Image: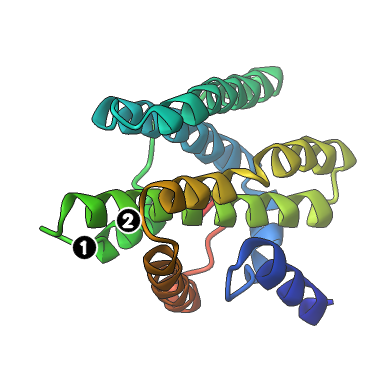
Amino acid sequence: MEDILSEHTRNILGLQLPTDPRWVNLAEIQLEEILTDHAYCEQKAATTCISLIQKNPEKEWLVEELSPIVTEEWGHFRMVLAELKKRNLSLGRQRKDVYVNKLIEFQKKGGSPDERFLDQMLIMALIEARSCERFKRLSEGLDDEYMRKFYRKFMESEAGHYTLFITLAEHYIDKKIVRKRWSEWLEYEKELMSSAEVRGDRIH
């Protein structure tokens, strides 16, 4: 099973290392924490897309493509909020996202505008890919059938987001440059995942 999942992960999402199977079991024990973290992940995805639009208004295709993503991600935020409310749970406070902060450390500092833009696109692609892979884990590994279906919807909805960010990068920057940098990001994320603590209270 692990080999099949690993192959699927590489082929569909490009990720080099699948999530540790223990993560799903830990997440199930801490479902309130997972839902809270998930809600903030969706919120941050929406606000980051808004920020990208604000920073790149001259990139008309980017504005057109990211505008509906803002709506979709905010809709996901509301869906998770509704699930928390249904369970008589509160949203709680946003926690530090160690995974995303570690990714930010790999972004090129002080590079050209194109280099900074490229890394912004690829970090979003990587976050979306890993989120989708985590949703897949939850949709297959949770004991609760309702929650498996709940996360199946998120997995299906978000499956194409990571490719959109790569496509946007390739629209504005030479494809060879994008692919080379994407490979570097994938290798970095692999090392990050291999050394990260397996925690069940975070989506990432």
The part of the image, by quadrant, that contains residue 188 is bottom left
Of residue 197 and residue 137, the one placed in the foreground of this image is 137
Q: Position of residue 31 (x, y in %)?
A: 65, 42
As drawn, the label of residue 108 is 1
The residue beneath circle 2 is 119
Q: Which residue sits at x=71%, y=60%?
A: 25
Q: Quadrant of the N terminus?
A: bottom right
Q: Position of residue 173 (x, y in %)?
A: 36, 54
**Residue at point 53% right, 61% down?**
199
Identified by mark 1, the residue type is Lys
Q: Residue at x 55, y 38 (%)?
A: 38
Tell which of 40 and 154 is nearer to you.
154
Decide if residue 12 is in sight here.
yes
Instruction: Please tell me how crowded label 1 is: few (under 14), some (14-19), or many (20+) other residues with Cα within 10 Å.
Output: some
Checking the image for residue 142, the label placed there is: none
Type of amino acid at the residue the image marks with label 2: Asp
Say left or right for 68 vs 13: left
Q: Nearer the viewer, residue 53 or 61?
A: 61
Q: Residue furthest left?
A: 110
Task: Give the quarter of the image for residue 103.
Answer: bottom left
Task: Identify the secondary structure beneath mark 2.
Answer: helix
What is the residue that sits farthest to the right in this orientation? 145
Is disc 1 in contact with disc 2, using a CB cutoff of under 8 Å? yes
Query: Residue at point 49% right, 53% down?
Result: 166
Is residue 186 positioned above or below 67 on the image?
Answer: below
User: Can residue 43 be seen in the rendering of this structure?
Assistant: no
Task: Please say if 22 is above or below 129.
Answer: below
- Residues at marks 1 and 2, CA–CA distance in whole angstroms: 7 Å
Instruction: Determine the secondary structure under disc 1.
Output: loop
Give the camera-side residue of 81 and 7: 7
